[in-house]
Amino acid sequence: MAISSVSEGNKHIIKIDGRFDFSLQSEFRQAYEPAAASSHFVIDFGGAEYIDSSALGMLLLLRDHAGGDSANIEIIHCRNEIKNILEISNFQKLFKIS
């Protein structure tokens, strides 16, 4: 399974392994939709090897679900290539990236 999730109280952790692309759209949505919009979401890219533009769109949909500008979303464990894509897309303005 490329996406797994676990909840710890108000913290909802979604781990992504392998390629994060359109083929995971439904699986990613199912990982965050059951969580309350006010949750603290952590997206763990530690096992991710690749993201494409549809993955960026999925992250934006998560942000909308989590409250838009008031969303509490953190992206962690990014490889340099993935971090570069997120920075080129100015996602550091929308998400906490570490």
Image: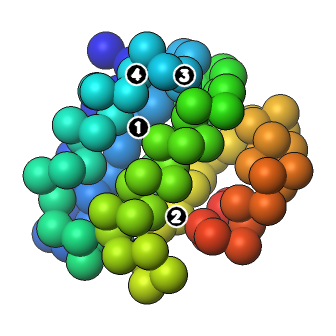
Q: What residue appears at the point 54 percent right and 25 percent down from the top-left corner?
A: 20
Where residue 65 sits, quadrant-wise, is bottom left
Q: CA distance from mark 4 to mark 1?
A: 12 Å
The residue where tag 2 is placed is 74
Q: Nearer the viewer, mark 3 or mark 1?
A: 3
Say which element carries label 4: helix
Q: Position of residue 67 (x, y in %)?
A: 35, 76
The three-letter code of the residue at mark 3 reads Asp
Horizontal side of 36 relative to 12 (left or right) equals left
Where residue 84 sits, quadrant-wise, is top right
Residue sitting nearer the eye, 69 or 20: 69
Horizontal side of 9 relative to 92 (left or right) equals left
Q: Position of residue 32 (x, y in %)?
A: 26, 49
Q: Nearer the viewer, mark 4 or mark 1?
A: 4
The three-letter code of the residue at mark 2 reads Glu
The residue where tag 4 is placed is 24
Q: Check disc 1: other Cα within 10 Å, few if <14, some if 14-19, many if 20+.
A: many
Q: Is residue 44 visible?
A: no
